[in-house]
Image (tube, rainbow, N blue to C red):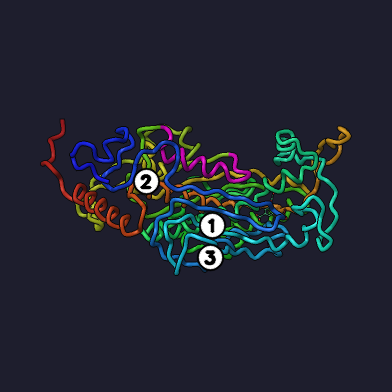
Amino acid sequence: MQNDGRAGGADDRLPAGRRRAKHGRNFVYNGAPMLRFLTAGESHGKSLVAILEGFPAGLPIDFDQITRDLRRRQGGYGRGRRMAIESDAAEIMSGVRRGRTTGAPIALVISNRDWINWHYTMTIEAEPPPEAGGARRAAVVRPRPGHADLAGALKYDHEDMRDVLERASARETAARVAVGAFTRQLLRHFDVEIVSHVTAIGDVMRDPEAVATFERLRQLPDDSPLRCVDPALEAQMITAIDRAREAGDTLGGTFEVVAHGLPPGLGSYVQWDRKLDGRLAQAMMCIPAIKAVGIGDGADAARRPGSSVHDEIVSRPDSADGLAIARPTNRAGGLEGGVTNGEDVRVTGHMKPIATLMKPLRSVDLTTLAEAPATIERSDVCAVPAAAAVGEAMVAFVLADAFIERFGGDSLAQMETHVRETALRLRRRLSRPTIAARPER
Ligand code: EPS
């Protein structure tokens, strides 16, 4: 409700910070995002579950696109046998009616096809029912270095570390991709697109100076083996993965997520928890196995002088887009002061190698406390392209949250009005000077 100036209005009784802003939505950012989601589910349990809340009403949903996003996460050279079993698809349980979001929480379920082979192991009842299928698996007692096994067992007092690894497994990221598919469709409605590519597998890496344009990345086919823009380099990456597989080893790598078409002004510099670079870093860092995150040039920026790091601002009075200023480079990755500046947002994720090694590392049997090789579970040799698809989903989520925060998001129509007004104001401000140019001093 807008404050109409009369004493005793409902808004006047709220503390200043809680009064509703002009858009009819409370813009106070108190650490709780506008948009939020939770997931549940075990890797070999019956299904994965997600609830997405705070999503605006009125967005038409392309259901096939959700499935395509899920399939992209399943692909990539170096994946294990599990991906041949699964054919991920999300069943929408609520929050969508007649093809459009209603503003209510969106609940979705992704069934695990492999569950029937794990029913006995993963049974929920105290005793497996007589019909429970699947192998009789021994308890997991030899933690894998680099996995959550040991730390999780010590934290939750688990003797069988299956109770840890089932939830810590990267299978959970399928639920994140389904959530990301919704947020990506919201952004797409406002002409924002998100793509990604793999820039390194192990020590086979692209020249860090070589920037891949959004247009080039957009052309990468969904079924490309590693989603690398350079075919010769991709062949070397494939060889590296084959070598690691033969050696019973695993490989990590690096990927970059690029968001194109964002308006300036998402996020804020005024408080630590509003800074969009910080919010993106957290969202990327919480993807399993991600050990470092970069924005724009990332860590490289620390090694060069300011003159070759910062992106100059130039005057372009006759530019075709009607905006009279431009940035010839985008080393900042579209963010300055934690705020989008209108350039492509570029976020890099660095992934460590997967912790399950077919030639296992040394570990300790936690029941005997004697040294023993770590447990071997079916796993992947390399999952960097899958992590890139998850990275796209997490970036889409954070950007959609920031979009809703800036433009007010109870309904799509309301957001459209605010987006249009803001774009007009920007155009007016940057299309012509407000005063004549000052002489140089
Ligand atoms: C994954 C499913 C898992 C693994 C992988 C990711 O399936 P399974 O354990 O049945 O082979 O392939 O998980 C891990 C690498 C891990 O360390 O947990 C998936 O759906 O992405």
User: Which residue, given by chain and number where applicable, does mark 1 sit on?
Assistant: 107
- Image location (x, y in percent) of residue 440: 15, 34
Looking at the image, tell me whether mark 2 or mark 3 is earlier in sequence order.
Answer: 3
Report crowding for label 2: few under 14, some 14 to 19, many 20 or more residues within 10 A (C-alpha).
many
* Location of residue 11 by image quarter: top left
Q: Which residue of the protein is positioned furthest toward the top in this rendering?
A: 441
| Kind of residue at disc 2 | Glu
User: Which residue, given by chain and number where applicable, does mark 2 sit on?
Assistant: 405
Q: Secondary structure at mark 3?
A: loop
User: Which residue, given by chain and number where applicable, does mark 3 sit on?
Assistant: 221
The Cα atoms of the two marked residues, 1 and 2, are separated by 22 Å
- Which residue occupies 36% across, 38% down? 28
- 346 with respect to 165 (left or right): left
Which label was assigned to residue 381?
Answer: none
Please name the predominant secondary structure of the magenta segment in the image. helix
Looking at the image, tell me whether mark 1 or mark 2 is earlier in sequence order.
Answer: 1
Is any atom of residue 316 visible in this view?
no
Is any atom of residue 352 visible in this view?
yes
* Location of residue 27 by image quarter: top left
Task: Please state which of residues 421 and 359 is positioned toward the viewer in this rendering.
Answer: 421
- Which residue occupies 40% across, 41% down? 332
